[in-house]
């Protein structure tokens, strides 16, 4: 029996552990919070990721290490890789931790991106705005997720406020893209180089946080091939092993790379019930060197995220082919506390199911755009 160690004990680690259990896999999570939500379903070491004595104990007790969070310190990833097999590898992690390095790689490998420039000083910012223009968005290169560490610059008059908010950190300025829609591709690469993608999905965000996902993305026949080609090229370049997500904008019918998440991803949660083999099980299979599972979509699926607090579970539990996920976290503004996935054989059936559930939850607004896209 193998044991997978996971750095980070959030809902992603929890869902990885739940998916690996039927394969006879054990898990051990490390998190500095005593009641981490993955600790409710797997043994936990409560320690900081820079506590090398705790990491020594962790490394001894596991066969493979992986992550549920991309911002694990580089030192920790490198130290671990010297003691145990680590997937994805520290180089892949480091590349995706820095928005500038990541976007530069996308371009080198032929994936177009929004116009961008490195910003290390106020002068740089003024120069970059001169070339990129407004609207633009200033982002920290590192440690940003869910729209954190970002400042929208609508006109040059916003420079002072943007610099006051983020100046001092290493930054990147990006053109603000008036995209038609946001899509993502969840993909998985095995230790033997086997590669597979889930269907392209469409995503809607609220305040920079994922709100809803529709699988498969409508009218994506012409996008899936280039998206999969780009994902594969990036994964092969990084010698990536495990599940990852490529987040993309669609502008004038073309794909632009926004970012890569080096882990299982919120836009892949629907795969638990909507695909024959979930992104979580495939991550487990990949890091253990097992054959990858089927990544097709069974009909159509919609995932609704619950941020801050959970609604009443009963309307979801009462609906056929609707699935409730409570992460076991206490409510807090901006925190992902759970999700629901609805599955259906046809779009018509999904429209009815989604409208009924949203009404019962009092969340009609969250699904307006999804219903339009269906
Ligand atoms: P990120 O953390 O970079 O994925 O940004 C969070 C969300 O902000 C994205 O999913 C988009 O909805 C939006 N966003 C980020 N960067 C841009 C951009 N350059 N143009 C338009 N929207 C953006």
Image: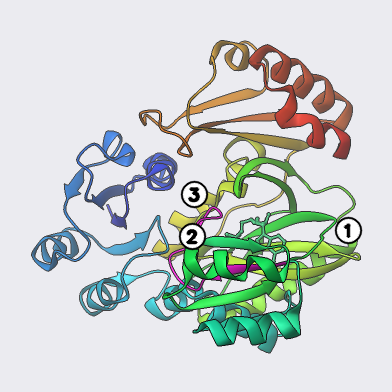
- Measured in 3D between alpha carbons, the distance from the residue under mark 1 to the one under mark 2, in whole angstroms, is 25 Å
The answer, for residue 344, to whether it is visible in the render is no
Pointer 3 and pointer 2: residues touching (CB < 8 Å)? no
Which residue is disc 2 drawn over? 263
Sequence-earlier tag: 3 or 1:
1
Is the residue 1 above or below the residue 38 in the image? below
Q: In the image, residue 258 lies at what x, y percent?
A: 66, 67
Q: Magenta includes 127?
A: no
- In depth, the one of 179 and 343 nearer the eye is 179
Q: Which element is circle 2 on?
A: loop
Q: In the image, residue 100 lies at what x, y percent?
A: 56, 80
Instruction: Estimate how packed mark 3 is, as few (under 14), some (14 to 19) or many (20 or more) residues with alpha carbons within 10 Å.
Output: many
Magenta residue span: 136-148
Q: Quadrant of ligand 1?
A: bottom right
The answer, for residue 355, to whether it is visible in the render is yes
- Measured in 3D between alpha carbons, the distance from the residue under mark 3 to the one under mark 1, in whole angstroms, is 26 Å
Which residue is disc 3 drawn over? 281
- The residue at the point 74 percent across, 27 percent down is 365
Identify the image quadrant of residue 43. Answer: top left
- The residue at the point 62 percent across, 85 percent down is 104
Q: Which element is circle 1 on?
A: helix
- The residue at the point 28 percent across, 47 percent down is 26
Residue farthest along the left direction in this orientation: 53
Q: Looking at the rendering, in which quadrant would you find the C terminus?
A: top right
């Amino acid at each position: 029996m193998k044991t997978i160690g996971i750095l980070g004990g959030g809902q992603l680690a929890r869902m990885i552990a739940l998916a690996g259990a039927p394969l006879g896999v054990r898990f051990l999570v490390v998190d500095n919070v005593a009641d981490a939500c993955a600790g409710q379903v797997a043994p936990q070491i409560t320690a900081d990721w820079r506590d090398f004595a705790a990491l020594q104990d962790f490394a001894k007790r596991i066969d493979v290490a992986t992550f549920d969070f991309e911002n694990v310190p580089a030192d920790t990833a490198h130290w671990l890789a010297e003691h145990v097999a680590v997937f994805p590898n520290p180089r892949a992690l480091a590349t995706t931790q820095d928005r500038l390095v990541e976007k530069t790689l996308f371009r080198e490998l032929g994936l177009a991106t929004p116009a961008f420039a490195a910003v290390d000083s106020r002068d740089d910012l003024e120069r970059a705005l001169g070339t990129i223009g407004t609207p633009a968005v200033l982002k920290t290169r590192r440690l940003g997720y869910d729209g954190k560490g970002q400042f929208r610059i609508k006109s040059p008059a916003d420079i002072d406020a943007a610099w006051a908010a983020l100046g001092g950190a290493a930054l990147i300025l990006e053109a603000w893209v008036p995209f038609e829609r946001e899509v993502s591709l969840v993909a998985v690469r095995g230790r033997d180089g086997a590669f597979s993608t889930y269907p392209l999905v469409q995503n809607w965000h609220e305040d920079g946080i994922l709100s809803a996902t529709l699988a498969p993305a409508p009218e994506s026949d012409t996008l899936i091939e280039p998206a999969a080609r780009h994902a594969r090229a990036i994964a092969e370049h990084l010698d990536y092993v495990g599940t990852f997500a490529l987040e993309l904008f669609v502008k004038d019918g073309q794909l632009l790379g926004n970012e890569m998440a080096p882990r299982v991803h919120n836009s892949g949660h629907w795969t638990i019930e909507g695909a024959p083999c979930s992104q979580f099980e495939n991550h487990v299979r990949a890091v253990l060197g097992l054959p990858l599972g089927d990544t097709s979509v069974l009909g159509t699926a919609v995932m609704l995220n619950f941020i801050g607090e959970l609604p009443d579970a009963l309307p979801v539990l009462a609906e056929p082919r609707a699935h409730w996920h409570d992460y076991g976290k206490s409510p807090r503004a901006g925190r992902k506390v759970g999700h629901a996935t609805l599955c259906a054989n046809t779009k018509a059936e999904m429209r009815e199911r989604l409208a009924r559930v949203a009404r019962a939850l009092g969340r009609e607004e969250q699904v307006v755009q999804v219903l339009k896209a269906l």
